[in-house]
Amino acid sequence: MAITASQVYVALFNRAIDGQTRSSFNGIAGTLASAEAASIKNLSEKDFVILIYKNALGKSLADDTEGINFWAQYAVDNKLSKDQLLTAIFSEIERKEQTGELTANENMALQVFKTKTQVSDYAAETIKGQVPADDLAKLTFGVGLEAVTGDNAGQILEAIKEQVNGVAVKYPVSNPGETFSLTAGTTAYTGTERDDTFNAVVSADSGSSTL
């Protein structure tokens, strides 16, 4: 299956992704190697699965002990790296959805994941500038964004999109143009369609060749 940046960021960090981060997405392994994933790298197989279940599916160890233990042991038995394990979990979810094997509880958990992923996709299209690391809580479900649960997953999408819109206005895309240095004399400068910068010397003397 083709795993998207939104799915990975929801599963690993429980947050939506901005447009610039999505454009530089370097797969699961690349994301796990990033500074943001520092606290994840040394998790045991079981703790990693617990994290994925909590972030992506809204399920705790108590909610699905059997499923979490299965994937943790599967990773150990098959010597899977964390990116391989996450891919395997995603692939099994997709397979069971396509074959109609999902139980009612599994389908509810899938709706949580889909809603979070839809929010993340919307954020990536809406937030053009990159959100700095110190402000990532604004894109985190249950912190800056409304929490998504099995009870509200079907009704909360539009409300969270409005929250994303509130974040987007704070981080407009940077659109740097060219820098022009004005000199004495008459020179025709042609600006670009971007945010150009014009540098000049400022003087109170109206007779000088300055602004």
Image (cartoon, rainbow, N blue to C red):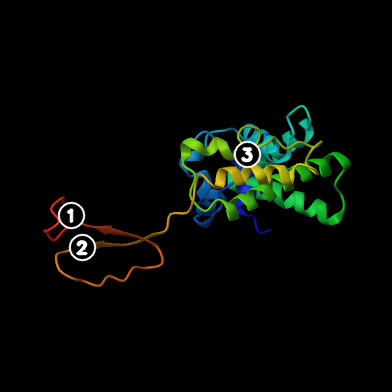
Kindly check if marks 3 and 2 are in contact, taking CB atoms under 8 A apart as contact. no
Q: Considering the numbered disc 2 on the image, is that residue within a helix, a strand or a loop?
A: loop
Q: Amino acid at mark 1?
A: Val
Q: Secondary structure at mark 1?
A: loop
Please tell me which residue lies in front, 155 or 86.
155
Residue 52 image label = none
Residue furthest toward the front?
206
Q: Which residue is mark 3?
A: 14
Does residue 34 appear to the left or right of 57 in the view shown? left
Image coords of residue 123 (percent x, y): 61, 49
Give me the C-alpha separation between circle 2 and circle 1. 8 Å
Q: Amino acid at mark 2?
A: Leu
Q: Is residue 29 rendered to the left or right of residue 99?
A: left
- Do the numbered discs 2 and 1 sit on residues whose CB atoms are within 8 Å? yes
**Rendered position, 193 above or below 161:** below
The quarter in which the C terminus is drawn is bottom left
Neighbour tally class for label 2: few under 14, some 14-19, many 20 plus, Cα within 10 Å? some
Looking at the image, residue 125 lies above or below residue 152: below
Q: Provide the residue designation for mark 2.
A: 182
Q: Quadrant of residue 76?
A: top right
Quadrant for residue 112, please give it. top right
Q: Position of residue 57 (x, y in %)?
A: 73, 39
